[in-house]
Image: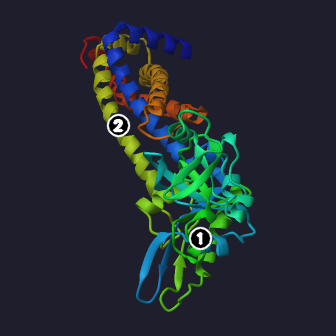
Amino acid sequence: MLKNYLLTAWNVLMRRKLFTAINLVCVVLTLVVLMVFTALLESAFYPSGVEGKSDRMLQVITIAASGPHTSTTSPLGYKVVEQYLKPMKSLERVAATTLARAVSVYQGATVSELMMRRTDADYWKVLDFTVLAGRVLNDDDLAQGRFVAVINASSARRLFPAGAALGQKINVAGQLFEVCGVVEDALQVNAYADIWAPITTLPSSAYRQQFSGEFTAILLARSAADLPQIRREVAAIAKSVVFDDPQTLNRAVFWADSKLDLFARLSVGDTDVPDSGAATVLALIGAAMLLFMLLPALNLVNLNTGRIAERSAEIGVRKAFGATSAQLMVQLVIENVVLCLAGGLIGLACTAGVLWWLEGSGLIPYLKIHLNFTVFCYGLVITLVFGVLSGVLPAWKMARLDPVHALKGAA
């Protein structure tokens, strides 16, 4: 039976090539936009590569401090990381890094604006950078306060176009660093930078006593199952923070968030409550995607209604020979699903082309994105939903036609 349905669907679609082509264009354009958006979301919230351990990673970025007469919210200070988070026994590792900041790099008469982070040695053990030359920062670099730096591949080509970067000196905002390593470019939230240097090369050691500053703590759990407990433990640790002047500040709030939680908390959430608002963000994204799918689906409903109406005589004959409304409806829906699946395959190929273009265009620096099995499954599901949405209504309408009226060509 299914084979007959598929053969009939193919013949019908080839009968009116213009209708088929218009439907395919609608399906392909819609799927390309949805697939590219889905791939970008997956890259942002569930990355692979450098942040491939993100399924068991959390980050603490901001601290909300308050007292009887004042309150403030700012990036984390190093003292919180060192004194309160690094001693946690439930974690495999805790890394500290500054936020990426723009710095001026002087090379003779040339000045380049690059993004710089200061990190500890654990940072390089939590994140999986691909080392292209030399080495990354280690514990000895931190302990000795060495003025060494790791740069990414793009910066190495930009600063040293005539030769190798290893061993070269770079002047970063008046500080002279020796390049000890070159790593692959990375876009992810915790990895994005052009230059990395030891925390201990900061111009002043005052950062060690600061509760607020410019740091991020990256928490690596032993397994993803430990994350809920770690979140609760971090929330409890925040309550135990004792400020230097309790008369001014006596309460601290900070949370261990995943990338999705962090985005939600900064966009729609509240820093004072455990709920980051991630469910709201996912609901909004899902609603937006559904609405985006409904617009072309409504257009396809009209096209499909017209295409199916031309077959009213055929439908009347089949009903006269005993075909049920359910059988006819299944046939008509299958035809539309076949069309959408064909559009889905074309759309997947076009999506791969768009993602390839995005990588090479430089619109998003250091973007590395590709179609994988997960994204392919998303595309398949979206295609099937799209096919059913745009085919059910006209199929239901035509399958209920009275055989006499259908044979007369009345829709």
Q: CA distance from mark 2 to mark 1?
A: 49 Å
- Residue, far front: 108
x, y (%) of residue 345? Answer: 49, 21
- Residue, far bottom: 247
Residue 133 lies left or right of residue 244; in this view the side is: right
x, y (%) of residue 291? Answer: 35, 42
Q: Residue at x 49, y 26 (%)?
A: 352
Residue 130 lies left or right of residue 393; in this view the side is: right
**Residue sitting nearer the eye, 120 or 302:** 120
Question: Hey, what amino acid is under mark 1?
Answer: Tyr
Q: Residue at x 34, y 37 (%)?
A: 294
Q: Is residue 79 above or below residue 303?
A: below
Residue 217 visible in image: no
> Which quadrant of the structure image shows residue 309?
top left
Q: Residue at x 47, y 89 (%)?
A: 248
How many neighbours does mark 1 have within 10 angstroms: few (below 14), some (14-19), or many (20 or more)? Answer: many
x, y (%) of residue 62? Answer: 51, 68
Q: Is residue 324 above or below residue 153?
A: above
Question: Hey, what amino acid is under mark 2?
Answer: Leu
Q: What number is the disc on residue 78? A: 1
SS class of the residue under badge 2?
Answer: helix
Q: Quadrant of the C terminus?
A: top left
Q: What number is the disc on residue 88? A: none
The residue tagged 2 is: 294
Q: Quadrant of the N terminus?
A: top right
